Structure formats: C-alpha cells, structure tokens
Amino acid sequence: MANSDKLGFGGLVAPTLRRVTAITPLHLDVLAGQDGLDRPVRWVAVSELEDPTPFLEGGELVLTTGMRLTPGDAVPYISRLVARGATGLGFGVGLGHDLVPAAYVDAAAAAGLPLVEVPRDTPFIAIGKVVSELIAAEQYEEISRAFAAQGRLTRAALQPSGTGAVIDRLAREISGWALLLDDAGAVRHVADATGTGPPAQEKAAALRPELARLKRTSSPASLALATPGEHMIIQPLGRRGFFVVGAARPFSPIEHTVVNAAGSLLTLALEQGRDQRAAAGRVRTAVFRLLLAGQAEAAADALAALGGTLPEGAVAVLACETADEESLTEALPCFTARWGRVVVALAPAADAHRLAERAAGHGRVGVGVPGVALALGLDQAERALASAHPVAHFAELAGQGLLALLEPGAATAFAAAMLAPLREYGSRGDLVESLRAYLASNGHWDAAAQRLGIHRHTLRYRMKRVSELLGRDLDDPSARAELWIALCL
C-alpha cells in the first residue's frame, strides 16, 4: 500500500517533482539534480527575494526569475534552499535572464537540488495550479483507497471468525504483521502478510512493558514504536485487550487510517461478544437451576438453544473459584455455569481429574464424588473447595466424619423421607437449596441470601415454610444436624 511517490506532509498528499516536470504543456526542462526528482512537491512558492527561506516550510518548489540574483549569489542561495528543505528550484527565463546562469546550474548540481528551467511562455501561476490540482487528485485517491480498505475490514468483521478475520485482513492491508492480544498480553490471533514477521509469542513477551504502561493510563491511547528495521503501533481495545501492527517501513497516512478503522471494528466486535457471552452465561445458570430442581429435560432444551448439550452418564461436579470466568469456560470442554461465588462445571466421570487439573490453571477447584446426586455433588465440591489445596477431591479428603459410618441404604432412605415434604411442595424446587444455603451459612441470613442471590426477607419466608412443612424448629441444633446430614446424602 505504501507508494514512494506519495508522502504525507501536514495532511497533504504531495505529487513528486518528476510528475510535475513530466506535464508536457508546462515545457519544463530539468537542468540539474535529476536524482532528486522523486521528492514530493508540497506547494509552489514564488519569490524574488535574495533569501526566501524565512517564508518557506520545506517541501516547496521555489520559482524565481532571478531579477535580484547575480552569479556570485548562486552557492549561498542554493545552499539556503537545501538547508530549508526545498524540493527544487524553478528558474524563469526570458525576463531577467535569457538562460539560467551556469553558476546556478553548477551549484544546484553540486548540492543535489533539482533545478528546472521555466520558459517565458509558462506562467508561474500555471505551475501552481497544476500542483494544486495534483494534490487534490492524490487526496481524493487516498481517501478512496482508505474507504475501500475500511470496506474490506468491515466485511472481514462480519465473517464467523470475527476478530481473527479482521486481524488477517489488517496484516494484508498494511503489508506487514498484526497481533491480537488479551488484556494480560497473551496472543489470541496472529497474522503475517510478509512471512518474515517476528514470532508471535516472542513479540508479545517483548511488548509487555509497553502494554503495562498503556494499562496504567487513565484514558488508553495508541503507542507508536520505531526501531531501525521495524515500525509498530499498539492500540488498546477498551479493557478487552490490545492489537499490534508492524511493518519494516513507516506507516503512510492511509495506513494510519486503516489501523484506526480496524481498532474501532475490533473494539466493537469484542464488546458485542462480551454482551453475547454474558447472556449465554445467564442461560447456563438457569439451566443449572433447572438441573438442581430435577427438571433435566427442560434444562437440556434450554441449553440446546445455545448449541450445547449436557454430559451423559455419571458426572462429577467441579466448583471453581476464578477471577476470569471467560477463560475458564473456554478452557473446559464441558457444561459450565456461574453459581453464586463459584463457577460450576459438570465433567464426565472419566475426565474429572483431567479437567480439574486444567481448571486449576484459572483458580482453586473442588471436586465432588462422581455419580452422586447433583445437589450432593455440588455440596461436596464446595466443601472440598474450602480446603487449602489448589485441587481438592472430596473423596480424597481425610476424615469424612460420621457420614462415612452410616449404612448407605438406610441413610439414603432417612434423607429421602425427611426431605420429602420439601421436594413435594407443589412445583417449587427452591426450598431444599434454600435450606442448604441457610445451614451452610450457620443460620446467617445475609450470607445465605447472598449465596442464593435473593433478598433476606425472601429467605426468611422460605425458612418459615420449611419449618412448617417439616414440623421442626430450625433453631434447634439437633434438628439442624439431622437436616444437614439428610442434605449431604
């Protein structure tokens, strides 16, 4: 995309002097400095001063008839133009001089400054108009190319791969490489249109100091970096990560425009993705609530709307404490749902140990006994999570207490009979879990209500109903002990 004949100066896209002198109707003749004809002409400046440089900015084609110039002024005059950054000198003949003085041709040749002879029949204003029209045409072309590139990026953003497609397209648009990083600086996607870009992981590691500096700023902004062989731009994507682009040469104005457009598309895609993931998370939580209530068919139907399925056969419940639910969910190829302060995963029994170890990379994990009732497995996983181990399996915890001494059949029958009034209470399936949360919180209303995600007055009403249905005083320690045992079976 870069073009050596088009360089940006102060927002203008300038044509080269070679292009200007090639316009036949102007009849311009290059007398010296042919090697400098690819310099951009930012503007045309007409001056008869012995020293016009105080009125120049650099990049101008200076036009003069040389009325006030003598051959002895040639070297200092040309030297001042070169020092100021003039693109070239147009010397008009037929007024002050019939020919361009040889001293000026020699001085320009020695300094490498293009010197152009302007015939009397070519008005200076005609040269100015030509340059102005060329600049306008170049600007229009650059704008058109920028719009076309933005269109290609937008179409890439609409592809199923979304952000990855945008990164791939961006690398091709700048003829360089591009990285998409998460907020921690880990590589999420890489594209290299040159085939010679730096290794992604190596580059991401080298950029961590700059990423940390950007994260500390109150209003994240882009950062440009340059080394002798590489130019880079780092842009934050809200608080969702960063993207980095690099090339072996400086970026042109149009490429800066393309990079900014890509940043907007990536930010929008990530924000929309976050909203979609949040909505999907709420659905999974509702599915898990249905499973706890014994409504497995309704849970499966609800999950199918997300394109997901529930594991078949015996499962183990994993309770995970993590600060990054999104990363944990992506790491576990099984059903997951937010449940209070933990993320719950339902792992097939055969994969429970392997998935627990994988989940441990994102936080602490408690694992229930595979194959038990879902509510019991959840309770076991949460109790295992309370241990000091990064990964704790309830079945491997030392000292299972009195429950281990009970005869399984009799204990299960006892629990079923005791809790039957709650399970049979109309279509309400929340009394058992409310009781579990209340007892697990040692009767603290606020803690239990927060765990359930309900108001404490709602919990008080439910506990009053539990007491009435069971005919037991929940303030009685023995009643609490029996109920807790029943809930754990």
Image (spheres, rainbow, N blue to C red):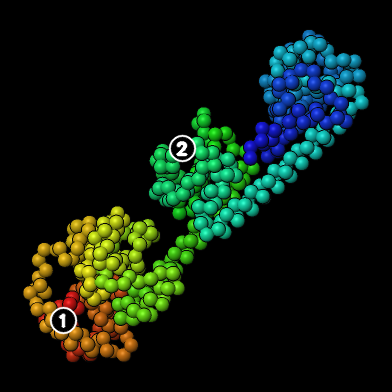
Picture disc at residue 412: 1
> x, y (%) of residue 84?
69, 23
Left or right side of 288 for 89: right
* Quadrant housing residue 29: top right
Point 55% across, 58% down: residue:
159
> x, y (%) of residue 92?
86, 21
**In-front residue for pair 104/429:** 429
State whether residue 38 is above or below residue 80.
below
State whether residue 65 is above or below residue 3.
above
State whether residue 94 is above or below residue 254.
above
Q: Is residue 386 visible?
A: no
Amino acid type of the residue tagged 2 in the rendering = Pro
Q: Residues within 10 Å of mark 1 (few under 14, many from 20)?
A: some
Amino acid type of the residue tagged 1 in the rendering = Thr
Please name the residue that numbered disc 2 is placed on. Answer: 198
* Quadrant housing residue 204: top left
Q: Quadrant of the N terminus?
A: top right
Q: Of label 2 and label 1, which has the lower sequence position?
A: 2
Total tally of numbered discs in the picture: 2
